[in-house]
Image (cartoon, rainbow, N blue to C red):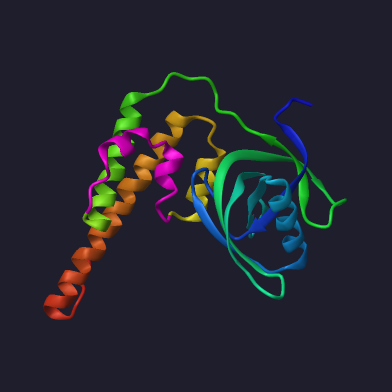
Amino acid sequence: MPDRTVRDFPLFPLGLVALPAELVPLHVFEERYRTMFEVCLESESEFGIVWAAEDGLKPVGCACEIAEVLERMDDGRLNVLTRGTRVFRIVERQDDLPYPAATVEFLADTDEEPDADSADTARAAYAELVEQATDKDPDPDELTAMTAYAMAATVDFGLDAKQGLLDLRSENARMRLVARLFRAATKRLDFIERAQSRARSNGKVRFG
């Protein structure tokens, strides 16, 4: 097996999608997952969040590290802050551990030349969205260093869109996708702001 294939990798199936660089707070209450997190804490190892969608468990997920234990409760429950690290694909599910696990393969991007135009377009769309949502401009140096994952990790997209980002093995393709997502989010914000303004002015929201 290649070095990027790992056996006994802990899995945490959830109704969410995590991205590399995203901070994900979790409440851990089931005994099997409390056991899993204790193993991860003791060995300082990663675990994987995979989307348990209506049509089944998605094969591609995001490995996460435990950034901080926020609270330990007397009954063993945990509140933890986790951070996405890298993307993996489930090769084979395992049933020989006291918690869900699998043999996984960590996925690398394809070799390609960076597309500066796609990156610039995505970062400009992100900056416009951040400015409209927060009235603050992103720091230019920080923005230049941000990957598609890093930008998307700060925006509440739908699960299908986030899973689509995980499935792409090209940073150029991810930049093109997040640019479309950021523009769509900006349009939604603009519509909401106009609707609220109209509602305040005459008590009605007019469509069209």
Percent of width and height locating residue 198: 16, 72
Q: Is residue 206 visible?
A: no
Q: Is residue 53 left or right of residue 191?
A: right
In magenta segment, residue 72: no
Please report the residue visible at 48 percent of the width from the left and 49 percent of the height from the top. 161
Q: Is residue 15 left or right of residue 122?
A: right
Identity of the residue furthest to the right in this view: 96
Residue 115 lies in quadrant: top left
Percent of width and height locating residue 135: 21, 56
Please report the residue visible at 17 percent of the width from the left and 81 percent of the height from the top. 203
Rendered-image quadrant of the N terminus: top right
Q: Is residue 5 left or right of residue 108?
A: right
Please report the residue visible at 50 percent of the width from the left and 29 percent of the height from the top. 170
Percent of width and height locating residue 14: 63, 59
Residue 108 lies in quadrant: top right
What range of the chain is rendered magenta?
136-156
Is 89 situated above or below 26? above
Percent of width and height locating residue 126: 31, 44
Nearer to us in this view, 103 or 191: 103
In magenta segment, residue 153: yes
Nearer to us in this view, 39 or 99: 39
Rendered-image quadrant of the C terminus: bottom left
Is 3 situated above or below 59? above
